[in-house]
Amino acid sequence: MSPFETTVDVRYRDLDPMGHVNNAVYATMFESARNDFFREAVGVDLADTDAVLASLAVEFHAPIEGTDPVTVLVWASAVGETSCTFAYEVRADGRTAAEGETVLVALGDDGDPVSLPDRLREALAAHTDPPEP
């Protein structure tokens, strides 16, 4: 199955003084795409998963200029017992502007990691294919 693809709006306030999307905004783009992915592809509201962000990495390839919407691809690159790793590709103007990765960990009421529900693990496993080169 192909990666999940969504459109993320770029707001004027996302731009730095040079008209480029500020580097901190990419984390918000990932979050928006991840929320859409869970809701539309997995059929679960991310807020109902009791998962928290454990790590975030971004690799920048080209600046995004202006406020045209961008395309964000997201897929589950690894599904573990208590965590899931997501990969992202941000595309603007027909090119890859950034790639990234986040890890979400499921937590119990006591704050310790717990197993991902089987239903969620199966749904995530169906969305593990990266984009075509």
Image: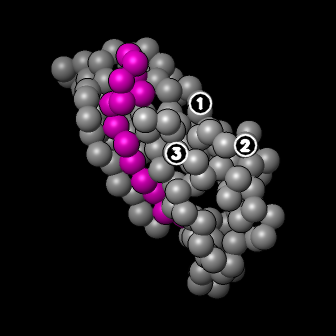
> In this picture, which residue range is highlighted in magenta?
91-104
Q: Look at the magenta stretch and give its main secondary structure.
A: strand
Mark 1 or mark 3, which is nearer to you?
A: 3
Question: Can you identify the residue that label 2 sits on?
Answer: 41
Quick one: quadrant of the C terminus? top left
The residue drawn where x is 25% and y is 29% is: 62
Q: Quadrant of residue 68?
A: top left
Q: Is residue 5 above or below residue 81?
A: above
**Would residue 57 appear left or right of 6 to someone viewing this image?**
left
Residue 93 among those drawn in magenta: yes
Tell me if mark 2 has few (under 14), some (14-19) or many (20+) residues whose alpha carbon lies within 10 angstroms of its own.
some
Relative to 68, 65 lies left or right = left
Which secondary structure, mark 3? loop
Residue contact between numbered discs 1 and 3, judged by CB atoms under 8 Å: no
Which residue is denoted by mark 1 in the rendering? 6
Q: CA distance from mark 2 to mark 3?
A: 15 Å
Three-letter residue code for mark 2: Ala
